[in-house]
Image (cartoon, coloured by chain):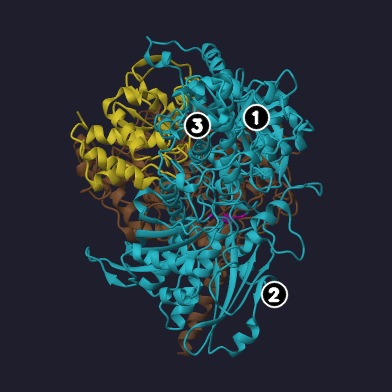
Chain colours: A cyan, B yellow, C brown
Amino acid sequence: MTKPANLLSPDTSLLTGAPVNLSRRRFLLLSAGTTAGAFVLGFGLPVGGARAEGLSGTMKPGTRVPAFLEIRPDNSVHLQSPFVEGGQGIFTAMAQIVGEELDADPAGFIVENAPAGSDYKVMGNGMRITGGSMSVRMSYSTMRRLGALARQMMLQAAAERLVAPVGELTTEPGRVIHGPSGRSIPYGQLAERAMDLPVPDPESVTLKDPGQFRWIGKPLARLDVYEKSVGKAIFAIDCRAEGMLYAAVQHAPRLGLTVGNVRNEDAVRAMKGVHSVHRLPGAVAVVAERWWSAKRAAEALQVDWREPGPESDVRYMPADFSTAAFSDLLANTPGSGQEAENVGDVAGALKNAHTVVSATYRSQYVNHAQLEPPSALARFNPDGTLELWIPNQAPEMFQADIARRTGLDPSRIIIHSPLLGGFFGRHFIYNTATPYPQAIQLAKEVGRPIKLIWSREEEFLRDTLRPMAAVRFRGGLDANGLPVALEAVTVCEGPTEGISGHKDGKIDPSAVEGLAGKAYAIPNHRIAQIYVKNPVMLGYWRSVGNSMNDFLYEAFLDELADKGGQDPYQLRLHLLRGNQRLSTLLQSVVDLSGGWKRGPFTATDGTGRARGIAMASPFGTETAAIAEVSIENGQIRVHDVWQSIDPGSIVNPAIIEAQVNSAVALGLSEVLLEEAVYKNGQPVARNYDLYPILPSDRMARVHVRIIESGAKMGGIGEPGLPAVPPAVANAVSRLTGQRVRSMPLSRHTFES
Amino acid sequence: MKLTINGITHQVEAEPDTPLLWVLRDELGMTGTKYGCGIAQCGACSVMVDDIVTRACVTPIESLENRRITTIEGIENDPVGKRVVAAWVKHQVPQCGYCQSGQVMAATALLKETPHPGDDEIAAAMVNLCRCGTYNAISAAIHDLAGDERTGQ
Amino acid sequence: MRKLLSVLLPVIVLAAAGVTWFATRVPSSPFDGVAGSQAPSPELIQRGEYIARLADCVGCHGSPDQPPFTGGLEMATPVGSIFATNITPDKETGIGNYSLADFDRAVRHDVARDGHHLYPAMPYPSYAKLSDDDVRALYAYFMHGVKPARHANKASDIPWPLSIRWPLAFWSALFMDHGSHHEQPSENAVWNRGAYLVQGPGHCGACHTPRGLAFNERALDDSNPLFLSGALLDGWYAPSLRGDPNRGLGRWSEDELHQFLKTGRNRHAVVFGSMTDAFNNSTQFMTDEDLRAIAHYLKSLPGDPRRDGPAWHYDPKSNDTLALNARLKTPGAQTFLAKCSFCHGADGRGQGQWFPPLAGAASLMARENASSINVTLNGSKRVVADGIPDAYRMPPFREQLSDRQIADVLSFARSSWGNNGEPVKPEEVKHLRESTDPANSSVIILHMR
């Protein structure tokens, strides 16, 4: 898929030739040649008859075939993906979906991220976002239809060439067949003409019967694995442009502070390799010939930071802010909140309950900690256009944001979206949390292309965080110990209102998802939110509200079960009675784990173990997970995670299994280790040293069962996460007898 | 000073305390070696120096004259490295791929030292971070290689 | 009984009067009655600024978030915290009303202008050796080279009766070596200059000389072999600065010592722990001449083989335990390989002057293991040499390694490559973990202007 990767990688002359004296000048010339070629690739689509059609923008997104597909004489199929690849396997899935209807082997696809443009807003809601586990499920039929339209155009081009009616033509993978004459023509020889034909009416093509699928539903190999195994995949941080300079920043220690006096500006400007020193909103920057020089010089700048004035429009981080105090503040904020759900009569049911169980559960801030630090390459072109190579999950939204910031017309802003070195929600529009506004300003001030990289420390200082919440639960049990009422009041600012602004009297669905939307038949339940604004910038984090709320809810549900003398698995089954899909799912994960065995029990290696179970309904998909834990040197060891996932219907089971593995890893990381701690208004951790993420020796074995219930297609990238933290916490509570009401478990003390 | 990388000698201009990582990436344009943390915590910058896995972000070039540096760009010139890459493809290891250059280097160094490592040895050698959680796939790929008679030859 | 009392009572009264006189008297200063110079020369102010660098006044009286010299540094003591005071010439909150004699009494005689005794956190046993000229210059600097800044002092939270200050008079009477520095005629001028800097303004002994039960430095000059023989203070073990080859400077040359104090690093070590502050704020600003004098003087202090043991030699045998199959059987070896070796070298020899060797490191051979535990738990502050922060920093491992893992890896390092330090116990790690915080990875500069 990554043609640019091959062009951009150090050319083979460097690897095979005689000793090379690589002067800087020669290197830049070399790279200029390669980058220029790479960067235009895919964006210089020739405009023929049909290709010009709809330049007026009248075609429906996802129908202008030449905007998406180029089939070269060598039969390679080049696909512009509306969705950005960041590890979730979307390039391969898109190739499978389009290839299925085009009748071209997905293995022969070369996929890259499409530029910004209305043609690519293919999601059912008219948007284009790589997030919310929406890519496949929101574009499935559109992208299939795109493949079918392209196939139809191949057939028409072949009909012209063979002078035969379209009706006599059919296809085999990669070629058109004329049955009566036995002649066939490869797509590669038809494409030039086909792409000049008008795109047929989208309603004129019929999609395949799923029973006839050749590739959809199969565990096809990913298209990007080889390039990623040999270092040839190109991420934003790897992009270069001719004549560019590097930049590094030093951010204000607290958000909102502004640049005052810079004491040693002259001395820093005189440092070797330094080009210039710049003042940015809430940061200072150094531009240099090399990033390492820029980074060291930026760190050397001695800035007197100033408190903001009333005109400041960014969140202000007070000097006395601490997460420990803020967590207590959330837990103790009074009120009953705005309702997200209110069914039955919770107050009455609690009053009449045989037992009432009350508890406050808490979640923590977490960092994205994607391994690729953010960067931005910005270049103003002689024709007045602004070209950017930036990690992003929504090119058109970034284009609009940059238009707003620069005053340029969006059509003058060219967005390149290289591969993402992990994202997990990191690369949305987050005002102060992205480097491109800085890179644009620097490129303007310097008059040359600027490659800005945030060091890991600057990234941890400005990363957006998954919100913190305190949830006050009250549960009512009847005389049999079964739940008759459940109330959850979350004190939290949701990520969406954190980013887009809170509306009085409105709840933020992303703050309550995972508390609300539970399928358990508890006759009286009430889910509500109390809004408390955070001083930190909030962001979306893999599985968003579900990443914490399913932990909070499912762990409390176990607490209720224990108080009522119920087995947590049996209780869940009971609460799901009549719900065929979820009962099947729950039983399947128990089955996958070899039968329900809560423990504590002694494993063959002599360790004491227990298992916990939990469920979640994130992003249109249903999941159930079981975790088995023991305690080793005071730390929780998670041995196995079994997960059943029902996304309705699927495209690639191998990718789903990989995504569940990945989501389990992040879920384990969150529940075992992660917490972004603030003291004195600053994050304590500025790197992985003080913010450990799951290392290999804490990973669990992962067992996945995919269930295709045939329900409406759900998401894949995120849903594997939310059931994992509560499954682990419930197992730990069972094993230790200590109720776990907060994450991460590394903050709890356990006896071996 | 001169650096020998993947069998080729390069004259580089950087200061002696500059980390190898940034000489590779910026001065030589070899961007396959990745920057993740800069303080030897993640392993994304792993390369081999004289066949020993080394973190390029904390390796000043001063100490590298007359040493044999192998980066991911040269991995397939090494017979063990080539088999590691093949196993990575077979087991579909990478997701986002950002850490995988380092993981492949670490696996290659492991198998060059110990052609048929056991579980504990694999765990001890594979300590690079992966935020996508490809650990199980990495482990499966190396177990596969560990059982391969050709590994180490 | 009554008789006895009648005899004793006058004695007691007399004694009490004597004690009161002693504890509350204001010591004399050679500057008594000297009118404060109204307009000192710029040269004198500049010289005073240099003395302030030598004495590292900003290290305690400076705070990164406040105007220079307004105090604030919290010093924990077993009985409570005390806070460094505002020493700007602000008249209300600082020392603006101090005469030269008042200033002298505070710096060299531990008595503030209002007569209260200073806590010995202020290293006046060393400052007592400052020359009259240097005190005059220092006063000129603080009165005219430092901007007055209003910043109220923070009261100590030491509870009564421990907060009563007059008993400190006895402390200083017992433990101070009053009187200024005396030249050793048998030694040359360089040695004498070094001795003055080390014993006086540099107050090296405040950290490096062992203290007695009353927190007193057990030696204040080279006449006593305990002087600068290494000491534990505030969670860090300041190693011997004497000729001990293992736990001191025995293997360092004068040039290497000079380089260390000038750049913060050499092939033996990189500054860490409290020495980072001493380097960042003080030693790097010393003239080459003064640094050479310090190096020359320190190298004249003999080691003590009885204390230091047989001299260290690199032993490559330990590297055998690092092979993949072997290291799984050696506690700490795997952690060393995974967490330490990439910077400090798999052979323990470091990387040039950029990463210090663990082989032969004084902190790993010292009987007191606090420094090695502390730096592993908490990492090290940024070393800023000539305005440029270090390229490489020691990260904290407290969030990644358990007490047992840290104990094991340090025990491994303390017994490898010829190192002869004793093992570290998990409880020792636990204790320091609970009483310390990780070093800040941001660059912190304490300004003097």
Q: Which residues are magenta?
A: A676-680
| Number of marks | 3
Name the residue rendered at 26%, 43% in the picture.
B143
Secondary structure of residue under mark 2: loop
C41 lies left or right of B55: right
What x and y, as percent, mark residue C413? 29, 44
Task: Check the residue under mark 3 and report the chain it is in.
Answer: A
Residue ID for mark 1: A388
What's the amino acid at mark 2?
Answer: Gly
Mark with earlier residue (3, 2)? 3
What x and y, as percent, mark residue C231? 38, 50
What's the amino acid at mark 1?
Answer: Leu
The label nearer to you, 3 versus 1, is: 3
Q: Please indicate, yes or no, whether residue C302 appears anywhere in the rendered image.
A: yes
Is A677 contained in the magenta span?
A: yes
Q: Residue furthest front?
A: A180
Q: Nearer the viewer, residue C75 or A30?
A: A30
